[in-house]
Structures are given as C-alpha cells and as structure tokens.
C-alpha cells in the first residue's frame, strides 16, 4: 500500500489528544533533537531514574541532550495516545533491549541519527523504524558481503559505483527496521532475509529464509526524511496506512502540537 502523508497541523488546545490512531494505521513522528537547553531541562523532568542514568552516561553533552529530547518525545507522544501522564509511563525491556509498555497494546519504535529522531506507533502490531545519515563508507562491497544476503550483494554490485553508497543505506535501514520490528535486536542474522535496494525500485521485503510468502506478511515503507538521510519502517501485516507528523514542543512538558 502506498504511504500517505498527513499535512502538518498545529493547535492551541492543551487538552487535545494525539491524532486518531486506527488499527490499520501507523503513525510516524519526526522530532528535531537539538532544542534549547532550557527546554531540555524541562523535558528531563519526564524521564525515569534509569533513563536519567542512561542520559548522564553519555560522554558528550550534545548526545546527552539529544537522548533526553528523544526519550521525552516518546513519553509525550505515547502518553497522548494512552491519555496518560508521560512521566508515569513504565517501560519494560525484552531480552534484546527493545522497550515496550507492559499490559498496553500500543506498539512503538524509535530511531535517531544526528539531530533527527523518528518515532513509530501502531496498535497491536509489531513495528520497527530506522534512519541513517548517508555518509562515505570505506568499503561498501566488504560491508555488504559481511551483512547482506547473497542476492542483495549481487543487486548492489550490479549498480554503478556512484549509486552503491545510497543503495547500501537503503538496504541497511530496511533491514534494521525489520529486525527491530521482529524484536530480536542484533541477534537476528541480517543475511537470512532480503530487501530491495536499488534507488528506482519500490521498497520491498523480498524473502525471509528464501520464503517470499513469509515476506509478504510484513509491510515495508522507505522514505528520505532529509536530502542527506534515508529511513525505513516495517510493521507486521501485509498493508498499512502510514501517516507522517511533526512533533512540536510547547512550553509545558506534558503538551505538544502536531
């Protein structure tokens, strides 16, 4: 199903809930992570003790601030969907470190690169998202052979050299989004499944362990959040309606607009 975009909207009602999230829809939120220090200090009050410990463990202040903003945005948005106070949400973690909300059917995933984060939300269906900045790689072929399925390597090497770098990141984000949706983290072998990667081809999950039918049980969307980045979203189910939103911060830590 072709992804669709909702235009950005703003509102002044401090009690407004999040946009309606239906069972067939995935909401993707874009969050600018470089916020004024005064706002970061306010958002910090939403985090749990373990989240604050993780934030304080970052060596560089910029990384610490970005983590705080991303985590606060996750809490604020999830809280809006659940009509719950963001600071009171309790996250648990699966054995591979993927966070989830206990006893709640709201599924979510987070990815960030540079000053941008993406948050994906869906009801009762696994979801994964990944974003990467396109950057020079020393040996694209070696990286592909070490991580990709054989047919992906063949598809990459069939491209002109000038197109391989972007194609690599196309594949990487799509594969990472799938692994995150599955929930196995880095323990899921990346060469067990294949995705499309050529710049002019539709984003598709091609097969899982050689099984094309298994791949069709997942929905994959790819997009470019900026001119220097690529991203992908994967969710369980053969189709989905993807709605894009921008997370705007307000003065009150519990409130935001879309």
Image (spheres, rainbow, N blue to C red):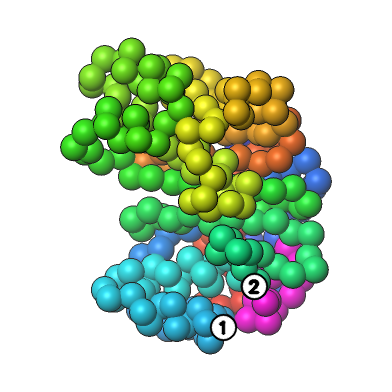
Q: Decide which of tag 1 and tag 2 comes sooner along the chain.
A: 1
**Numbered disc 2: secondary structure:** strand
Q: Residue at x 31, y 18 (%)?
A: 157
Coordinates of residue 20 in the picture (x, y in percent): 76, 53
Q: Is residue 158 found left or right of 121 in the rendered image?
A: left
Residue under the image location 73 percent in, 63 percent down: 81
Q: Specify the principal SS of the magenta part.
A: helix
Residue 47: x, y in percent? 54, 80
Structural crowding at the residue carrying mark 1, measured as other residues with C-alpha within 10 Å and reported as few (<14), some (14–19) or many (≥20): some
64 or 213: nearer the viewer: 213
Question: Residue 2: in sight, yes or no?
Answer: no
214, above or below 23, in the image: above
Q: Which residues are magenta?
A: 77-90
Vertical side of 79 occupied by 26: above or below: above
Q: Is residue 124 visible?
A: yes
What's the distance in space between the residues labelled 1 and 2, CA to CA? 9 Å
The one of 58 and 74 positioned closer to us in this rendering: 58
Q: Quadrant of residue 12?
A: bottom right
Tell me the number on the disc at residue 48.
1
Residue 67 x %, y %: 42, 69
Q: Quadrant of residue 173?
A: top left
Q: Is residue 170 above or below residue 110?
A: above
Q: Residue sitting at 53 percent across and 86 percent down?
A: 49
Look at the image and say whether residue 85 sits in the magenta stretch. Answer: yes
Residue 13 lies in the magenta-colored region: no
The numbered mark at residue 91 is 2
Q: Which residue does the image show at 70% across and 68% down from the upper left?
A: 101
Judged left or right of residue 79, residue 105 is: right
């Amino acid at each position: 199903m072709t992804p669709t975009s909702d235009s950005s909207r703003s509102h002044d009602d401090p009690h407004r809930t999040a946009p309606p999230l239906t069972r067939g829809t995935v909401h993707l939120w874009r969050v600018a992570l470089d916020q004024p220090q005064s706002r970061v200090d306010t958002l910090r009050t939403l985090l749990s003790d373990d989240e604050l410990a993780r934030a304080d463990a970052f060596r560089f202040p910029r990384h610490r601030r970005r983590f705080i903003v991303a985590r606060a945005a996750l809490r604020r948005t999830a809280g809006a969907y659940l009509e719950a106070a963001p600071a009171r949400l309790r996250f648990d973690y699966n054995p591979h470190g993927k966070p989830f909300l206990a006893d709640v059917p709201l599924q979510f995933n987070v990815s960030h690169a540079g000053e941008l984060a993406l948050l994906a939300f869906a009801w009762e269906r696994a979801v994964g998202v990944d974003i990467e900045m396109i950057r020079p790689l020393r040996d694209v072929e070696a990286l592909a052979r070490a991580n990709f399925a054989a047919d992906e390597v063949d598809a990459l090497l069939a491209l002109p050299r000038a197109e391989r770098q972007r194609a690599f990141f196309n594949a990487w984000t799509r594969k990472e989004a799938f692994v995150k949706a599955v929930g196995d983290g880095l323990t899921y072998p990346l060469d067990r499944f294949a995705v499309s990667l050529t710049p002019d081809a539709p984003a598709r999950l091609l097969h899982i362990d050689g099984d094309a039918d298994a791949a069709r049980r997942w929905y994959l969307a790819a997009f470019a959040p900026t001119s220097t980045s690529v991203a992908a979203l994967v969710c369980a189910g053969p189709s989905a309606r993807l709605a894009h939103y921008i997370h705007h911060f307000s003065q009150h830590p519990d409130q935001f607009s879309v």
